[in-house]
Image (tube, helix red, strand yellow):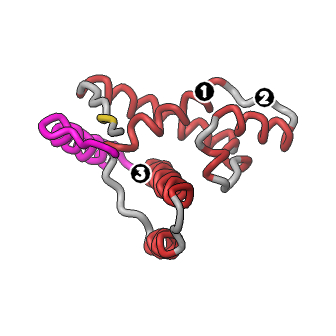
Amino acid sequence: MSSNLIIPSAEELRRNLIRLRELILKSAETRISDFLPDDPEMFKDPEKIAEFIEEKDGEKLEDWEEEKLDLLYKVSPFVPVALPEEVIQHIIELDSQVKTPEDERKLEEEIRFQHVQTIVKRILAMETEEEWEEFMEAVEKVRQEDEKTPPVFD
């Protein structure tokens, strides 16, 4: 069974990126990200993260933090980021251990998790509006390419 990626409009993607940036910066300011677990299984499920943070600091995860996670996964297919070398080595090592379809699924989740983590770090590292605009232009180019030839996932 294959599914097609839903390609957002340029305006929708831009709105999502701007909102995502606001939420990432807000999250960094409130340091909620310090409570996020390293487990990719938990990271992809906002409810599990909410439970985890509640246990750690006694507060409920705010709606904006869930919105940030949703937006991260919506925009991530269009964000060109280079994974750090140590992450690439980690993924290569995991790939060499794949033996079952479940292992393959876990590897795909780990790759996606590392991708969104890299996106967050990249956005946090931007110091100027010029860097932000260049980033948004690169994302828009990927969106346009995918619009011309949508990727198909098996």
**Quadrant in which residue 149 is drawn:** top left
Residue nearest the viewer, comparing 82 with 89 = 89
Instruction: State which mark lies toward you, 3 or 2.
Output: 2
- Name the residue located 46 percent from the left edge and 38 percent from the top edge: 73
At label 1, the amino acid type is Trp
| Disc 1 + disc 3, Cβ < 8 Å | no
Task: Judge whether residue 139 is colored magenta.
Answer: yes
Q: At which x and y percent is residue 110?
A: 53, 57
Q: Secondary structure at mark 3?
A: loop
At label 3, the amino acid type is Met
At label 2, the amino acid type is Lys
Q: At which x and y percent is residue 137?
A: 23, 42
- Find the distance from the CA under tag 1 to the CA under tag 2: 11 Å
The answer to whether any part of residue 124 appears in the image is no
Considering every residue shown, the one lying at the far left of the view is 148
Give the residue at mark 2.
60
- Name the residue located 49 percent from the left edge and 59 percent from the top edge: 104
Q: Quadrant of the N terminus?
A: top left
Q: Which residues are magenta?
A: 127-154
Give the residue at mark 1.
64
Q: At which x and y percent is residue 47?
A: 69, 32
| Disc 1 + disc 2, Cβ < 8 Å | no
Residue nearest the viewer, comparing 110 with 25 = 110
Mark 1 Cα shell of 10 Å, populated few (<14), some (14-19), many (≥20): some
Q: Give the numbered dot on residue 126.
A: 3
Residue nearest the viewer, comparing 146 with 26 = 146
Q: At which x and y percent is residue 15?
A: 36, 25
Q: Secondary structure at mark 1?
A: helix
